[in-house]
Image (cartoon, rainbow, N blue to C red):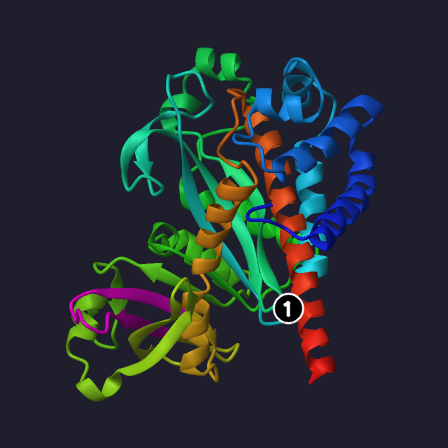
């Protein structure tokens, strides 16, 4: 845990890890990897300098990293089954009728050409094209907190077509090339199958600009607030126009100030404008264009296509648009506190195993911190 946790916090975390360890036991047929997986979670949450194979092995009291490497490589366990358990665990503790499922990606900078899916490609982490792997993630965000609950490694087209590289990295034959907007289709279906219910889905323009992704959400009867690029086309009632051109003619009275949620320095204030387009459909749903404008830089704008119940207040659309920040915070915390990007595995299975355990560690940390915050709130009310 970051900072200097209190003795009570350390005990609470240890107790929750014991509970989670019993939960995970069902996924490990052999006792040795079962025990090592729980200790791996503990290691991911400890204060070692780097959470790689050597340092985690030392944390486990082992002279070499071979046991950790075996856990992430050859041991008999199903990372997808553990992922499903992660979804259930997180939703049990964070369930919220007004919650949001958030889609986003993050990059993992890597050297060489052997790690599964690595190549020179754009990394949002670096803000430029770098040699990296890219993972597509799903998070659940609500009033009780947020957690990353699903993950998939993006396999570039060049990798998907290269049998030799696939074999060397252990990429299963059924895994084919899929565009980034195709990844969250399976992630969302899994979340819904496992009982996750969310009022909205939110995503950035990589996904919002994809018409198939929007149609999938509409066919699934899932309301959404999706960022789109300024050149996204929108039917304005008479013709198709770019969203930036549509919003350019809005009057000064169309704009209202509102917070997109809390940031590191307090509320994130912007000016917002929203307008409905088209008729209300047979479900009672409406399409809106939501625009966010920087308070001091009027030309700095972000655009969102939104679809959901026609009686949705505009401030609710703003809340959902702002919830995208939760997955970015999740990446920061997972990398900073749970070793998400500190793995030294190259294989397909190794990536998914490490990342799944890292996300589970993050969910445990979220649950424990939320429990402590609620207890602190009750204590203050009692004293009052």
- Label 1 environment density (alpha carbons within 10 Å; few <14, some 14–19, many ≥20): some
Q: Secondary structure at mark 1?
A: loop
Q: Residue at x 37, y 29 (%)?
A: 132
Query: In the displayed structure, would residue 329 be above or below residue 120?
Result: below
- Identify residue for label 1: 96
Q: Position of residue 361 (x, y in %)?
A: 64, 43
Give yes or no for residue 234 being in the magenta stretch: no
Outermost residue toward the bottom?
A: 253
Quarter holding the C terminus is bottom right
Query: In the displayed structure, would residue 258 be above or below residue 175?
Result: below
Q: Main secondary structure of the magenta part?
A: strand
| Residue 105 shown left or right of residue 40 in the figure | left
Q: How many marks?
A: 1
- Please name whichever residue, 149 or 269, is drawn nearer the observer in this view of the structure: 269
| Residue 241 shown left or right of residue 275 in the figure | left
Question: Magenta segment range?
Answer: 288-306
Looking at the rendering, which quadrant does residue 202 occupy?
A: bottom left
Q: Position of residue 251 (x, y in %)?
A: 18, 85
């Amino acid at each position: 845990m970051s900072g200097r946790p209190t003795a009570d916090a350390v005990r609470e975390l240890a107790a929750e890890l014991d509970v989670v360890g019993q939960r995970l036991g069902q996924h490990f047929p052999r006792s040795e990897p079962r025990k090592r997986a729980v200790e791996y979670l503990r290691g991911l949450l400890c204060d070692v300098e780097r959470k790689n194979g050597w340092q985690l092995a030392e944390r486990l009291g082992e002279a070499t990293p071979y046991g950790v490497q075996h856990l992430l490589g050859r041991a008999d366990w199903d990372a997808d089954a553990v992922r499903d358990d992660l979804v259930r665990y997180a939703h049990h503790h964070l369930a919220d009728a007004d919650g949001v499922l958030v889609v986003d990606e993050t990059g993992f900078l890597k050297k060489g050409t052997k790690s599964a899916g690595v190549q020179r490609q754009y990394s949002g982490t670096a803000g430029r094209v770098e040699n990296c792997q890219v993972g597509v993630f799903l998070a659940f965000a609500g009033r009780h907190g947020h957690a990353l609950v699903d993950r998939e490694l993006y396999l570039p087209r060049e990798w998907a077509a290269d049998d030799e590289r696939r074999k060397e990295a252990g990429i299963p034959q059924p895994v084919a090339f899929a565009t980034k907007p195709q990844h969250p289709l399976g992630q969302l279906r899994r979340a819904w199958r496992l009982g996750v219910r969310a009022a909205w889905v939110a995503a950035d323009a990589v996904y919002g600009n994809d018409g198939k992704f929007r149609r999938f959400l509409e066919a699934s009867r899932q309301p959404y607030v999706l960022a789109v690029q300024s050149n996204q086309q929108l039917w304005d009632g008479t013709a198709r126009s770019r969203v930036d051109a549509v919003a350019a003619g809005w009057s000064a009275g169309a704009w209202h100030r509102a917070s997109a949620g809390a940031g590191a320095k307090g509320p994130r204030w912007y000016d917002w404008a929203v307008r409905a387009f088209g008729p209300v459909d047979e479900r009672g749903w409406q399409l809106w264009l939501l625009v966010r404008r920087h308070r001091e830089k009027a030309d700095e704008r972000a655009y969102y296509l939104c679809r959901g119940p026609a009686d949705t207040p505009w401030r609710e659309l703003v809340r959902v648009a702002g919830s995208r920040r939760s997955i970015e915070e999740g990446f920061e915390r997972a990398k900073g506190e749970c070793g998400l990007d500190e793995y030294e595995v190259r294989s397909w299975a190794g990536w998914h195993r490490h990342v799944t355990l890292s996300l589970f560690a993050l969910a445990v940390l979220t649950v424990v911190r939320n429990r402590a915050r609620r207890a602190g709130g009750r204590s203050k009310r009692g004293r009052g």
